[in-house]
Amino acid sequence: MPLFILVLVSFAAAYLAVMMGVLARRKPGYRHGLHTISELGEVSAPDQRFVALGLFLPVGLALGLAAAFLMSRHEALAALAGAVAAGYILAALFPCDRGSPISGSARQAVHKAGGAMEYLGGGYALLNLAEVHGAPFSVAGVIVLIAAALLTVLPAKSLRGLVQRLAETVLFLALLYGILRLQ
């Protein structure tokens, strides 16, 4: 089963990375370092529907499935996969307002709650993993939690995109590393 989970999470991460590159080219003025991933599918974006249903939802469901399979083998890894899954599923169901502002509509509030679940929940899961598996997970947890704090205070068109991509990379790599350790 760990091989299946490893392939599932690897595919989700690769699909996300490739599609972010493709979709960024289709959105005028979009820059990875400045704009959040969610802004690819913000309200009124050219590819809003595809980002929600063709990118965020499949990635979220794949990670949710991984979390379900991991639950019987490793609860902390399941929590990590589940936290990231929650962020993507809520982003699919509640697209962000234009520019993904810190505050905004009720939809934006739910979208931001999904991000909080992903980053705070993921950071907490990583710190729990560190108790058994050591320093790499501790460092990863601290990075994700610092990124979460920065994402709540950085203004639009700052380095939010770069900070978010760092957090996403750390979450996915830590999840993959944890799954590999189950082998």
Image: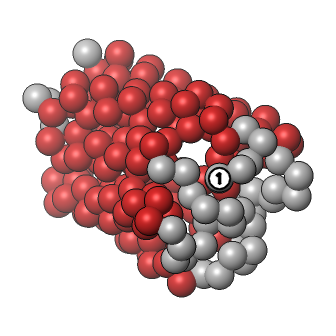
Residue 111 appears at what percent x and percent y? 46, 58
Which quadrant of the rendered structure holds the C terminus?
A: top left
Q: Amino acid at mark 1?
A: Val
Residue 46 lies left or right of residue 127; in this view the side is right
Number of numbered discs = 1
Left or right of 82 in this view: 169: right
| Residue at figure coordinates x 41%, y 41% from the top left | 89
Q: Residue at x 75, y 74 (%)?
A: 157
Q: Residues within 10 Å of mark 1 (few under 14, many from 20)?
A: some
The part of the image, by quadrant, that contains residue 81 is: top left
Q: How is the model colour-coded?
A: secondary structure
The quarter in which the N terminus is drawn is: top left
Going 60% across and 53% down the picture, which residue do you hit? 38
Q: Indicate the position of residue 128 as horizontal and vertical percent values.
A: 19, 59
Towards the viewer: 126 or 15: 15
Answer with the quarter of the image where residue 125 lies.
Answer: bottom left
Task: Describe residue 63's horizontal placement relative to residue 147 as left or right.
Answer: left
Position of 109 relative to 67 (above/below): below
Compared with 78, 155 (above or below) is below
Residue at the spot 67% in from the left edge and 41% down from the top edge? 48
Horizontal and vertical percent for residue 42?
65, 53
Q: Is residue 34 visible?
A: yes
Q: Is residue 134 visible?
A: no
Q: Which residue is mark 1?
A: 43
